[in-house]
Amino acid sequence: MKTCIACGMPMKTKEDFAMGDESKDYCKFCARPDGTMQSYDEKLKGMTGFIVKTQGLDEEAARNAAKGMMAKLPAWKEIEV
């Protein structure tokens, strides 16, 4: 089982992968409509919204939590924030 390099989601089935392509290292939630991987800023915005929605944190706390999680993921290791 692969794990998404951009958000950490376990990718268990073909449908979990971007465009259903199991050779991709990122999931369907981290892909743009054309199948390319979202940028850091796009992913940060999406993860922040997800945390606000699912955990009830305010925007700033959610953004900080998202940054902390993303800093540990392979896709964003070299990003300075």
Image: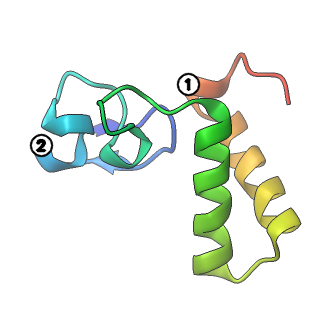
Per the rendering, the mark at residue 60 is none
Mark 1 nearby-residue class (10 Å; few <14, some 14–19, many ≥20): some
Q: Circle 1 sits in a helix, a strand or a loop, which is it?
A: helix
Residue 11 coordinates in the image, percent (x, y): 27, 45
Q: What residue appears at the point 58 percent right and 30 percent down from the top-left corner? A: 39
Residue on which disc 2 sits: 14
Q: Circle 2 sits in a helix, a strand or a loop, which is it?
A: helix
In the figure, residue 25 lies in which quadrant? top left
Residue on which disc 1 sits: 75
In the figure, residue 73 lies in which quadrant? top right
Q: What residue appears at the point 58 percent right and 43 percent down from the top-left corner? A: 43
Q: Among all residues in the image, which is located at the extreme front? A: 34
Above or below 35: residue 1: below
Quadrant housing the N terminus = top left
N-terminal-most mark, 2 or 1: 2
Mark 2 touching mark 1, by CB under 8 A? no
- The three-letter code of the residue at mark 2 reads Lys
Above or below 81: residue 68: below
Q: What residue appears at the point 14 percent right and 38 percent down from the top-left corner? A: 20
> Is 6 situated left or right of 26 in this image?
right
Seen from the viewer's position, the closer of residues 65 and 52 is 52
Mark 2 nearby-residue class (10 Å; few <14, some 14–19, many ≥20): some
Quadrant housing the C terminus = top right
> Is 2 situated left or right of 7 in this image?
left
In the figure, residue 27 lies in which quadrant? top left
Above or below 79: residue 54: below
Residue 44 coordinates in the image, percent (x, y): 67, 46
Q: Is residue 63 visible?
A: yes
Q: What residue appears at the point 60 percent right and 78 percent down from the top-left corner? A: 53
> Is 4 situated left or right of 12 in this image?
right
